[in-house]
Image: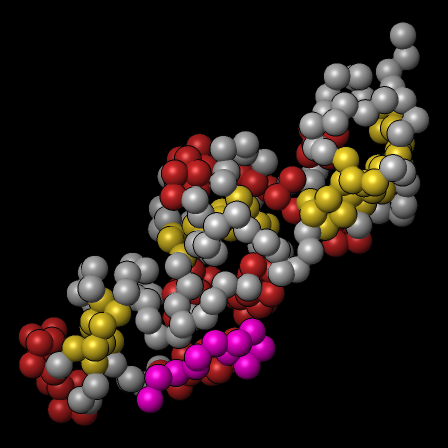
Amino acid sequence: MEKPEIWIEFAAELHVFVGAPRRAGWSAVRTDGTATLGHVVESLGVPLTEVGSLRAAGGPVAAAHVPVDGERFSVLAVARPQQLPGPARFLLDVHLGTLARRLRLLGVDAAYESVDIGDPALAARSAAEQRVMLSRDRGLLHRRELWAGGYVYSHRPVEQLRDVLSRFAPPLAPWTRCTACNGTLRTAEKAEVRKQLQDGTERAYDVFAQCADCAQVYWRGAHHSQLDAIVAAAVDEFGGPGRPA
């Protein structure tokens, strides 16, 4: 018996995942008659984390639907902002360290693996801690164990940050997280942190914060204007309380 032939079209936002022949509109796909629509979509290169909905002539279709011969399906991208089943908490893989630090700068809960622990361990952590897995690794985003995931489309940290903020709309609380470990910051008196300061820093600054988890000390040093610019741009575009006085 001849295998079923179905027709699929992908939203323009998903063209980055599929081959050129499938970017021009409807394209024919042969299935084995048992594979679900979700499996077919992923087999063509699109992680389901990037799919907002699947539609047929009669309306929305579940990823578990088993297509039959002649059916037509539209694969739509996720709507922005994307609704999550829980708080906007993230897990970033080893290649996204700069993005992790910038999210933390904005007060976003962003766990980060600084070494490559492997896809199974990342997916397991995403599930255990209910974190959105952010990655440019399409294979990782295909893993069923993920609690949720998001493909990071750009190589550039500035664009990566805008992409994540526009997609997931996490609440911003700048200057409240440690950029080193993701812990929470508290105001610290100079006397408390003096042993961790160099002489020049102790003489030049009076306002300090310290991480409640790793004890890292922060002050408004030479690079603070650059960080201010990142925070101001994000708050201006996506909202948030801005920098505390």
The quadrant of the rendering that contains the C terminus is bottom left
In this rendering, the answer to whether 42 lies above or below 214 is: above
Residue 144 at what x, y percent from top left?
54, 32
In the displayed image of the protein, which residue is found farthest to the bottom?
A: 204
Per the picture, the main secondary structure of the magenta-coloured stretch is: loop
In this rendering, the answer to whether 134 lies above or below 57 is: below
Left or right: residue 230 compared with residue 224: right
In the displayed image of the protein, which residue is found farthest to the top?
A: 1
Q: Quadrant of residue 26?
A: top right
Asked whether residue 77 is in view, the answer is: yes
Q: Residue at x 43, y 81 (%)?
A: 242
Residue 63 at what x, y percent from top left?
70, 32
In this rendering, the answer to whether 198 lies above or below 69 is: below
The quadrant of the rendering that contains the N terminus is top right
Q: Residue at x 49, y 47 (%)?
A: 133
In this rendering, the answer to whether 149 lies above or below 223 is: above
| The magenta segment | 235-245
